[in-house]
Amino acid sequence: MSSDTGVNKKDANRENILKIAQEIFSKYGYKKTTLDDIANAVRKGKSSLYYYFSSKEDLFQAVILKEVEILKRELEKVILRNTDPVEKLRDYILTKLNTYRGLANFYHALENDVTAIEFIDNIKNKYNQEEIRMIKRILIEGVRKNAFDVKDFTLVAIGITTAIKGLEMPLSAGDYGTVNLETGVDNILKILCYGIMKRN
C-alpha cells in the first residue's frame, strides 16, 4: 500500500515538474531556460530535478513527448466521432491547428530544431507516420460511405498532411495568425475536396 502511494507521489511530482517546465520553456525557449529557473519555479532544489530527469535536454524531450501525446489524444477523439467523413476531416484539421497553436514547445522544436536534432527528427518522422495513418482512416471511411473518391489512400493522405503542415506556421504565428481558423480551414477544405478548377 505505502509503495503504491510512493509511486503515485513520484508520478505527481514528475507531472508537476513537467507542467511547470512546459510553461517556462514555452515562455523563454529552450536555450534561455536553465534548470535553475525550473527548480525555482517548482520550489525544489536542482538536485530533485535530477532525480526525475538526467539533464535539461532530457526534461525538454519529456515536455515535447507530453505535448505530442496531448495532440494525439485530441486527434484520436475526432477520428472516433460518429460524424460525416467530410465533417470529420474538417474537425481533424481544425483540432490539429487549434491544439498546435497551444503547444508552443512542440511547435518551436519542429520549426527551429532547437536541440537534440536527432530526437526532434525521430519525433517528426514518427508523428508524420501517425498523422498519415489517421488521415487514411478518415479517407477509407469516406470511400466506404460514398463521400470520397480516392484511388491511392496513402498518396492522398500524404498530400493532405503536407497541406496541413504548410498551414501550421502561417495560421499559428505568421501573417494569418489572427485569421479565424474555421473560415481558413473551410476555404482550404473546399480546395482539398473540390479543387480550384471551374466546373461548367
Image: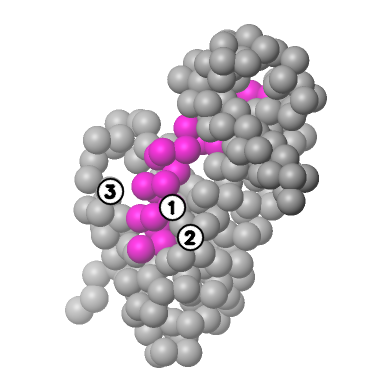
Q: Earlier in the sequence, mark 1 or mark 3?
A: 1
Horizontal relation, residue 121 to residue 80: left or right? right
| Circle 3 residue | 181
**Is mark 2 in CB contact (under 8 Å) with mark 1?**
yes
Position of residue 40 measured from the top left corner of the image (x, y, whole percent):
57, 11
Mark 1 and mark 3: Cα distance apart in space: 11 Å
Identify the residue at horizontal 47%, vertical 70% (top origin).
Answer: 79
Horizontal relation, residue 114 to residue 27: left or right? right
- Name the residue nearer the viewer: 22 or 171: 22
Mark 2 and mark 1: Cα distance apart in space: 7 Å
| Circle 2 residue | 75
| Circle 1 residue | 96
Identify the residue at horizontal 68%, vertical 28% (top origin).
Answer: 59
Position of residue 169 measured from the top left corner of the image (x, y, whole percent):
43, 37
Q: Earlier in the sequence, mark 2 or mark 1?
A: 2
Any magenta on residue 114?
yes
From the viewer's perspective, is residue 10 above or below residue 114? Answer: below
From the viewer's perspective, is residue 197 above or below residue 140? Answer: above
Q: Amino acid at mark 3?
A: Leu
Q: Residues within 10 Å of mark 2 (few under 14, many from 20)?
A: many
Q: Main secondary structure of the magenta part?
A: helix
Position of residue 113 measured from the top left corner of the image (x, y, whole percent):
64, 28
Identify the residue at horizontal 35%, vertical 55% (top origin).
Answer: 94
Q: Amino acid at mark 2?
A: Leu
From the viewer's perspective, is residue 52 above or below residue 36? Answer: below
Pair 2/1: label in front: 2
- The stretch of residues the image draws in magenta is 91-116
Any magenta on residue 26?
no
